[in-house]
Image: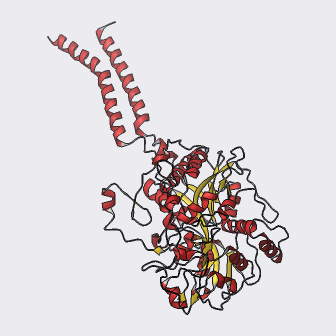
Amino acid sequence: MSMPQQRRRSLRGVAVLLATLIAVCSAGIGGAAPAQAARQVPITGVGSSWSAIAIAAWVAQVKSTYQLDVSYEPSGSSNGRKQFAAGVPDFGVSEIPYGLVDNGQSDSSPRPYVYMPIVAGGTSFMYNLKIGGKRVTKLRLSGETIVKIFTGQITNWSDPAIKTDNPNLTLPARKIVVVVRSDGSGTTAQFSTWMSKKYASDWNAFCQKAGRSVNPCGVTSIYPTIPGMVAQAGSTGVAGYVQQSSAEGAITYVEYGYATNAGFPVVSLLNAAGYYVQPTASNVAVGLLGAKINNDASNPATYLTQILDGVYDNGDKRAYPLSSYSYMILPTKTDTKFTTDKGYTLGKFGYYFLCQGQQNVERLGYSPLPINLVQAGFEQLQKVPGVETQTINIAGCNNPTFSSDGKNTIAEKAPQPEDCQQKGPTQCLAATDAGAAGATKGASRTAPGSTAKGANPTGTVRAGASPGSTAPGGSLIPGGAAPSVDPETGQTVTPAAPAGDGGDAQQAGGQQDALSGQPVSSVPVSLAADAWGPGRTLLMSLAVLLLLGVALAPPIIAHWSSARGRSR
């Protein structure tokens, strides 16, 4: 074979090698979209309004920090379970498990699922009551009195039973307006569970009077009504009704966050130890130490559901009797709508709120999850198809309820109640209460749930949002910020305005809360970064150039040497 033919074949070989390298590099660098970015897709959820304030905060935070696109419709636990079973949303949220017998009927889901705990809290009793034009902020009620009010047996605020609970208040002879949920709700289920367990005779008699045919009445998600009661849809509906100036004398049951958001007080409820306590984060955490968790993993319909009898009868002086937690309903199989891409995004969202997201829930009126429920949440989340399994050290989770060695710190540090909170002839009173009723000195200065200077007392959602729905941006918090809740007194306090643009917190390595702009102490959970960042692209480019050099240099040098030899 002649020398020119050899050179031509050599050059053709180089051309083929070059084309192959270019094709490989184009596939690796050029066109393919980043694998993880392509998998991060929008997800939707439907369900509980009880936990909606916390979920709305998490939605805003992951959108701002991690560009996760999550939307949530707080249309009630019953609708959430129904919509999830029909395959409409990607996840549901409920305080009521499937299989609950409600007025003789039960629901189920053909769609495979598991429950995951998401946030704890107290079902509170928000009220609108004044004495001589001044708002009452330190109202105390026993469980028996509460039940008689919500079953129509006590109808006036001057009733002797209410006077017994409040010896230092002279309450007005005003009609009690009972406001209940008109829709199926987890809040109603929690409240009715407590009444059916602790005050069965009163509850059963009321259900019969309201036309319920089932006896015993048991748990229900739709509250029975009698003439004179006001029924409103959603937590925002009942809270919004009570806070109206025209609704003086009204009382409702609602998640604590809605009352603090509106700047309205809630009842101090008598516990088993004989103390009237508020549904603060610490009191809820202590109360839930009496809860039992169904740990039979062989039955997903009941696994991780809560048994609250020990909460109702918790003998700790700090325990709030109506404490519970909410579940997220997670799909465990893909279908035509739920894909592994959605599972991937749902996994990132879940990992966030089980750890870092729990830091903000106390100021929203909730209680963070304890360590056992966080660990159970990790296990459940890994059953979702498409979830990227991450090694998360529980010691670095930075959940405020426990320390790195697993101690329940929020329960250990929960303050003891004052002597005046004990059932008896004295009572803690705020300045407004004391001034109105002529109570003794030494009263508390500020009432739980009272509106501090600068707080938004309206409790309305952001512009463009209807009651019971999340506003643009996913927040139920008026003006984008919520009042803080003092863990000892339950006092509502407006958060201080951030200094400057918040740059100091970021420069110091801190993270800003997505709602208020305030720095929060947190250790972010690792959310997988883009695998094709600019640094890796640069390295790939250099590797390609090196390969090209290795492939092309020998024939070029040989050709150049041959040409020099002929020219001599």
Furthest toward the left, the residue is 568
Which residue lies at the image location 42% right of the left edge and 55% below the top edge?
Answer: 522
Residue sitting at 66 percent across and 73 percent down? 233
Counting from the top left corner in percent of width and height, residue 540 is at 35, 34
Question: Which x, y percent locates residue 401?
Answer: 51, 56
* Quadrant showing the C terminus: top left
Q: Quadrant of the N terminus?
A: top left
Q: Which residue does the image show at 65% across and 90% down from the upper left?
A: 174
* Count of labels in the image: 0
User: Is 465 on the left or on the right of 521, as rendered?
Assistant: right
- Residue 17: x and y in percent read 38, 23
Does any portion of residue 174 appear in the rendered image?
yes
Quadrant of the rendered image containing residue 248 = bottom right
Q: Which of the 4 image quadrants contains residue 545?
A: top left
Q: Residue at x 66, y 46 (%)?
A: 335
Residue 225: where, in percent of width, then height?
A: 76, 77
The answer to which image quadrant residue 91 occupies is bottom right
Q: Nearer the viewer, residue 527 or 174?
A: 174
- Residue extending furthest top? 1
106 sits left or right of 142 in the view: right
Of 60 and 240, the residue lying toward us:
240
